[in-house]
Amino acid sequence: MTDIMALHVRYAVKKLMDNEFEDEIVDGVFGGAGNDIEKMFEESPSTTRKREQLRKSIQKLKESKKVVEKIIDKINEITLIE
């Protein structure tokens, strides 16, 4: 008799878990997945800051390139004159 009661309780708990909590578990695991994926594509503040620093560095390098080109042009003009 005890074995039958234990099996019945075990069956009832399993049925409760399968039927009642299944939706909650699925929502808990997969329900917020859409928001998590969107968050993955958002840029973190540190990444934004690094991107801005890189952009500024690239701009400085471009400006430096123009300055060096002008200096080389002037050196070439001077050497052609002599």
Image (cartoon, helix red, strand yellow):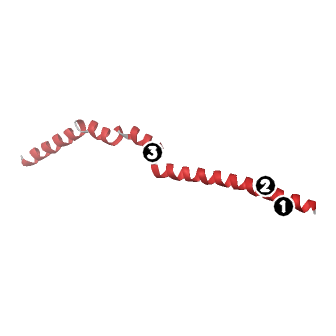
Residue position marked by numbered label 3 in the rendering: 40
Callouts 1 and 3 close, C-beta under 8 Å: no
Residue at x 44% of width, y 40% of height: 38
Q: Distance between the residues labelled 1 and 3?
A: 52 Å
Local SS, label 3:
helix
Callouts 2 and 1 close, C-beta under 8 Å: no
Residue position marked by numbered label 1 in the rendering: 75
Please tell me the numbered disc located at residue 27.
Answer: none
Q: Distance between the residues labelled 3 and 2?
A: 45 Å
Local SS, label 1:
helix
Instruction: Estimate the x, y position of residue 8 in percent, counting from the top left.
Output: 13, 42
Residue position marked by numbered label 2 in the rendering: 70
Number of other residues with Cα within 10 Å of mark 3, as a class: few under 14, some 14 to 19, many 20 or more: few
Residue at x 11% of width, y 47% of height: 6
Q: What residue type is labelled 2?
A: Lys
Q: Which of marks 2 and 1 is nearer the N terminus?
A: 2
Q: Which amino acid does label 3 sit on?
A: Met
Residue at x 50% of width, y 48% of height: 48
Q: In which quarter of the image is the C terminus?
A: bottom right
| Left/right of residue 82 with respect to residue 40 in the rendered view | right
Q: Which amino acid does label 1 sit on?
A: Ile
Q: Which of marks 3 and 2 is nearer the N terminus?
A: 3
Front residue (pair 19, 49): 49
Residue at x 78% of width, y 55% of height: 69
Q: How far apart are marks 2 and 1 (CA)?
A: 9 Å
Front residue (pair 45, 4): 45
Quadrant in the picture for residue 29 = top left
Q: Earlier in the sequence, mark 1 or mark 3?
A: 3
Number of other residues with Cα within 10 Å of mark 1, as a class: few under 14, some 14 to 19, many 20 or more: few
| Left/right of residue 76 with respect to residue 24 in the rendered view | right
